[in-house]
Amino acid sequence: MKRYLAGILATAALLSAESFTLKSSDLEGQLSLKQVYSGFGCTGENVSPQLSWEHAPKGTKSFALTVYDPDAPTGSGWWHWVVFNIPATASSLPSGAGSSEGKGLPKGAVQGVTSYGAPGFGGACPPVGHGPHRYVFTVHALDVDVLQADASATPALIGYLINHHTIQKASLISYYAR
């Protein structure tokens, strides 16, 4: 009986634990022109969305944020935003934090180079007629205070380091087509 009761209590504790969650007041199912790139034939505003997260797992020492399009016709996807060394005390980024200057980022956060070849948020710009692309916004809870890389590191290297140190992650997906 004691074993049965212990099992019920353990299950209840797991069910009541809150999940690491990423939210946005700016994102919906479809990206708006605000999050579309300005260039490469696209005429959006290229503004990163507001993002917030809650219930980070125990042991989180920093966060990283990635925005990735797995549907880009490159064979390796397209990195739209890579931010790392976000302090563990942070729980949100305001709209526009991904400007090339990173004015809305917490102190110490670093924006890596994107597939556009520059740091900062690079909005959606899929090829015309290619169909809807998925834009996966992911916050990673990391087990290190600082990733040993700088802003000039490739998105693939930063992605490798992020994945190596991820305790848990939370994602949102929005779509865009032209």
Image (spheres, rainbow, N blue to C red):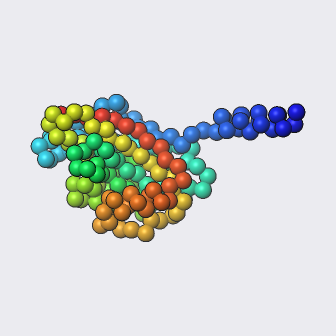
Residue 113 location, quadrant: bottom left
Q: Quadrant of the N terminus?
A: top right
In the displayed structure, would residue 17 be above or below residue 62? above
Residue 153, given in percent of the width and then of the height, sits at: 32, 66
Image point 76% across, 33% down: which residue? 8
In the picture, measured across the screen, residue 152 lies left or right of residue 139, that is: left
In the picture, measured across the screen, residue 33 lies left or right of residue 106, that is: left
In the picture, measured across the screen, residue 91 lies left or right of residue 151, that is: right
Is residue 86 at all visible to an observer of this figure?
Answer: no
Q: Residue furthest front?
A: 75
Image point 50% across, 40% down: which residue? 21
Residue 163, given in percent of the width and then of the height, sits at: 45, 56
Image point 54% across, 53% down: which residue? 167
In the displayed structure, would residue 46 be above or below residue 59? above
Residue 44, given in percent of the width and then of the height, sits at: 19, 40
Residue 149 location, quadrant: bottom left
